[in-house]
């Protein structure tokens, strides 16, 4: 398939890329733009490691064609949530509560948790579990993730 030029709005910046129409956004982010915080886990929409925000909604970037993402939509990756010197409250809480082991699932967890608190700043534990349910962690850090999210809620 012939490649085309796309304009993406990623983390508040306009980026130009060349890719095939149906190329998954995940690979464009990682390979074309160097945003390797977004991870490849399953490639089939199951694990959540590749989660990004598109217009504020959590999307599995392994299942989103770049052509869809380029339609003037705002894309936020883990790199857009905070920086080393300016972490988001959730990023700080994940560190404080050791809400990871290998860290592979962490970007997707943080993206999902960020979307949750943006829509519902005071979710119950049940609502947190439901929201995070589709982000898989092979290290079993689930309880620490929930506690980190609850810490942010308490501090708000
Ligand atoms: S890599 Fe996209 S959901 Fe697993
Ligand atoms: S911390 Fe290792 S997969 Fe979640």
Image: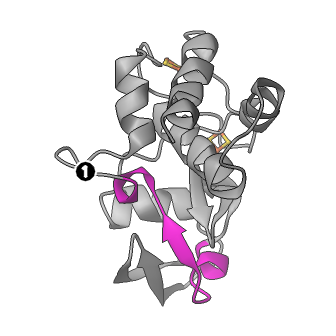
Above or below: residue 80 compared with residue 141: below
Asked which colour scheme the image uses, the reply is one colour
Position of 94 with respect to 49 (left or right) is left
Quarter holding residue 66: bottom right
Above or below: residue 124 compared with residue 34: above
Is residue 19 in the magenta section? Answer: no
Give coordinates of residue 122: x percent, y percent.
69, 41
Quarter holding residue 70: bottom right
Depth check: give the residue in front, 151 or 68. Answer: 151
Give the residue at mark 1: 83
Give coordinates of residue 4: x percent, y percent.
50, 88
Mark 1 Cα shell of 10 Å, populated few (<14), some (14-19), many (≥20): few
Q: Residue at the spot x=55%, y=47% of the render?
A: 111
Q: Which residue lies furthest to the left in this view?
A: 85
Q: Which part of the image, by quadrant, shows the N terminus?
A: bottom right
- Residues in magenta? 66-81
């Amino acid at each position: 398939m012939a490649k085309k030029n796309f304009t993406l709005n990623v983390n508040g910046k306009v980026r130009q890329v060349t890719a095939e129409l149906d190329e998954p956004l995940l690979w464009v982010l990682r390979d074309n733009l160097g945003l390797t915080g977004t991870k490849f886990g399953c490639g089939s929409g199951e694990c959540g490691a590749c989660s990004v925000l598109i217009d504020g909604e959590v999307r599995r970037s392994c299942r989103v064609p770049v052509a869809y993402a380029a339609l003037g939509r705002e894309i936020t990756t883990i790199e857009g949530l905070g920086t080393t010197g300016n972490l988001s409250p959730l990023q700080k809480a994940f560190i404080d509560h050791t809400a990871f082991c290998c860290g592979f699932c962490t970007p997707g967890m943080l993206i999902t948790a960020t979307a949750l608190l943006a829509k519902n700043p005071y979710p119950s534990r049940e609502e947190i579990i439901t929201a995070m349910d589709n982000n898989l962690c092979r290290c079993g850090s689930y309880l620490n993730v929930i506690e980190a999210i609850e810490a942010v809620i308490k501090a708000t």
